[in-house]
Amino acid sequence: MTTIFKYKLHAEFGTVQEIKLAMGATPLEIAWQDGSLVMWILTTDDTKGLESRYFTVYATGSDISYSNLTYIGTAQTETGNDKFKFLVFHVFEIVPDDMPEAS
């Protein structure tokens, strides 16, 4: 059965988050919900074919440390600060060939 699931993302710029998803799952949307950065994924409930997928978040103007990324979406949230009213979060999936080697 195909369905949509929601996953919380780490809202820390430049960190890598591993999410185990059914093979072929498709990211649909990025947004803020109840104070958390979340991503909705179109997927099957088949747990036999799980794969690790890696996502990272960057701010506007920040240095990007990976060269092979797939853009997923952008979300922004108010800061309550008069100088910087919004923080903008750009979410990318890291292509597996670009992942650093485990030490």
Image (cartoon, grey):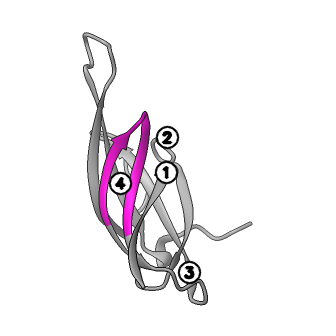
* Left or right: residue 57 compared with residue 101: left
| Quarter of the picture holding the N terminus | bottom left
In the picture, residue 27 is in which quadrant? Answer: bottom left
| Magenta residue span | 28-41
Where 34 falls versus 98 (above or below)?
A: above
Residue under label 4, please give it. 91
Q: Out of 87 and 28, give the one closest to the viewer.
A: 28
Where 11 falls versus 42 (above or below)?
A: above
Mark 4 is surrounded, within 10 Å at the Cα level, by few (under 14), some (14 to 19) or many (20 or more) other residues, namely many
Residue under label 1, please give it. 8
Q: Out of 2 and 58, give the one closest to the viewer.
A: 2
- Give residue 51's mark: 3
Q: Which of disc 3 and disc 1 is earlier in sequence?
A: 1
- Give residue 12's mark: 2
Q: Which of disc 3 and disc 4 is earlier in sequence?
A: 3
Which amino acid, by three-letter code, is at mark 4? Val
Looking at the picture, how far across and down is residue 5, in whole percent? Answer: 43, 65
The residue shown at (48%, 85%) is 23
